[in-house]
Amino acid sequence: MIKEIYLFNPENDMALANFTPHYKAPTEIIQMSKDLSVLPAWYAPQGSMIKLDSLSQADLLKEQCPFPELIPQVEWSDSWDNVPYRPWGWNPSLLHALQMAGISSQYLLSNEQMEKLRFLSGRQRCVEVLESFPSMNHLCGQATICNSITQVKELVSSIGECILKAPWSGSGRGLVRISPTNWTPSVEGWLARTLRVQKEIMVEPLYNKEKDFAMEFYAEGGNIHFVGYSLFETDSHGNYKTNILLSDAKIEEVLLRYIPSPVLQDTCLILEKKLSEILGKDYQGYLGVDMMICQSPDGYSLHPCVEINLRMNMGIVSHIIFERYIQPQAHGKYLIEYYPSNGAALEMHHYLQITHPAHLHNKKLAKGYFSLTPVLQDTHYHAFLLLD
């Protein structure tokens, strides 16, 4: 059996939005890709290969890990081997890079498949999913596709405070909060540019969010099946901050404080059915559907489809890590932190090692700080666990 190479390419969403083979990622995203390149080792199947910039990153990971028995049983490569690839996500820029590296076309997406994937990854698919939900108590969520500034203005005028979303953009990007009272020339300029390039804009009411979470799925052969939950936090701009490390049962307990169990169960079944219809056999792999629990005068309601992430995502990563490496009764956080200055990440690494020493129970992590990626003087992005 041919081994697959797992590759962390965090620029994927922006490259998919740009949709040219010559897309160049921003410097900070290139840094993230380098600093976190070993991350796929923690979610790839045992025996997989992990693509690194330098094999020294694997050596440093082993050197810094306090529990050698927890090091993933994978192989490491710093070359472009001619084998199947499992990237964080597919986009034309990655496709071009692999073609230039001489990877056989049998291991790559065709241009037609790439076009289809972009279509399926557009935020417009959320509208199709939301329309498939019957009228149910404890549900909210609507989205409208607009193709002119006039349409957007009319909707904002009738709804009030809204979120405008570019159909394709990086996580937490391409979003503008707007109301009839703060419509500005800069907003109109952004709208005009987005419509010129992407042809459409999503308009959604602004909801009073209480909790962010996701249902994670796996697509294979035209079928979709539920994998588990992820409970996460974002900042005020919608950028990902952290995943809460809990078992699926514990996450469901949290959600059931707000939403009745039948609503969650029905939502999962509806999503499996609708996503199978939309994706067919055109997508294989993990995907996540971001959701919100929202507060209203009548109580709490579930927004069942805020975003569809048609790629690997941090929720699935944290879910797999919890299942494989963490003691079931433990809880804590999975974090990706950014440190702007050289040495700051390494200093924090040493501090957490002292203040939150890691402990194992039954060969699984039960408490303390555990680094998932190696840390050097010039590290700026760091993935780690912090268990209570």
Image (tube, helix red, strand yellow):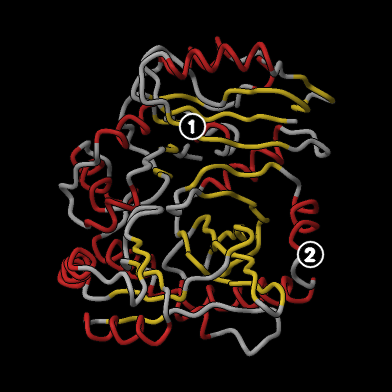
Identify residue type, mark 2. Answer: Leu
Residue 63 in the figure: left or right of residue 106: right
Disc 1 on helix, strand or loop?
strand
Task: Identify which residue, 213 or 204, lies in the foreground.
Answer: 204
Residue 304 in the figure: left or right of residue 269: left
Residue 36 versus residue 19 in the image, above or below: above
Dot 2 corresponds to which residue? 256
In percent of width and height, residue 288 lies at 54, 59
Identify residue type, mark 1. Answer: Glu
Residue 135 versus residue 346 in the image, above or below: below
In percent of width and height, residue 208 lies at 57, 67
**Residue at the extreme bottom of the image, as rendered:** 135
Circles 1 and 2: CB distance less than 8 Å?
A: no
Name which quarter of the figure residue 351 lies in: top right
Disc 2 on helix, strand or loop?
loop
Name which quarter of the figure residue 81 lies in: top left
Name which quarter of the figure residue 216 lies in: bottom right
**Residue at figure coordinates x 49%, y 80% from the top left:** 142
Task: Identify which residue, 175 or 206, lies in the foreground.
Answer: 206
**Residue at figure coordinates x 46%, y 81% from the top left:** 128
Residue 194 in the figure: left or right of residue 367: left
Which quarter of the figure is the C terminus placed in? top right
Dot 1 corresponds to which residue? 337
**Residue at figure coordinates x 15%, y 47% from the top left:** 22
In percent of width and height, residue 110 lies at 27, 59
